[in-house]
Image: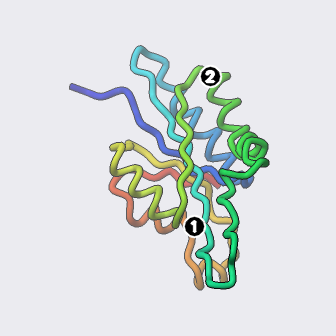
Amino acid sequence: MLNLRKKILVAIDGSPQSDKAAEEAVRMAAGSQSQFMSRIYAMLVLPNAPTSTYTDFVPSAPVTETDRWDQLRRQIFYVIEKSALEHNVPLEMVVEYGEPAEKLLNFAKKEQVDVIVIGSSGKGFLQRRLKGSVSHKVATTAACSVYIVR
């Protein structure tokens, strides 16, 4: 049977590129207005919490456990939440810690995502050559389709 319902994973980080990717993901999901509604997973990957050393008596709490997390979360997910609500698209927000490309790929595999939508790298040529970009790593490694938004 043909599966018209799609699972769409969009990488969110609060940057203008990720906001464009979020809007594009909602457009993709809303484009199939049928009984088979697509679902969007919006994933924010935060860097690993710094490891404490013997000089740290009280390690700092992860950002998700601070008082300002609610405000920060609203800012980062604002575009995707607003757009998904306007188009009546089911949205699940996911926050992970770790290396972004690895977390996106693992989640996509686990949830059997049909397409990953990600903003293009905002890095310059030299930074891309030295560090690589998340969008490049995802595009070259993912088992599903990858849509890179510029």
Which residue was labeled with disc 1? 48
Q: Is residue 21 left or right of residue 98?
A: right
Please report the residue visible at 62 percent of the width from the left and 28 percent of the height from the top: 84
**Mark identifier at residue 87:** 2
Please report the residue visible at 35 percent of the width from the left and 26 percent of the height from the top: 4
Looking at the picture, does residue 113 appear above or below residue 132? above
Secondary-structure class at tag 1? loop
* Of 39 and 4, the residue lying toward us: 39
Looking at the picture, does residue 70 appear above or below residue 13? above
Secondary-structure class at tag 2? loop
Point out the residue furthest to the left here.
Answer: 1
Which quadrant: the N terminus? top left
Q: Quadrant of residue 132?
A: bottom right
Where is residue 106? Give x, y as percent. Answer: 39, 56
Identify residue type, mark 1.
Asn
* Of 42 and 4, the residue lying toward us: 42
Q: Is residue 103 left or right of residue 132?
A: left
Which quadrant: the C terminus? bottom right
Q: Is residue 114 left or right of residue 40?
A: left
Point out the residue furthest to the front here.
Answer: 57
Where is residue 53? Give x, y as percent. Answer: 62, 82
Point out the residue furthest to the top here.
Answer: 35
Identify residue type, mark 2.
His
Query: How packed is label 1: few (under 14 Cα within 10 Å), some, or many (20 or more)?
Result: few
**Mark identifier at residue 112:** none
Q: Nearer the viewer, mark 2 or mark 1?
A: 1
Where is residue 20? Give x, y as percent. Answer: 68, 46
Q: Earlier in the sequence, mark 2 or mark 1?
A: 1
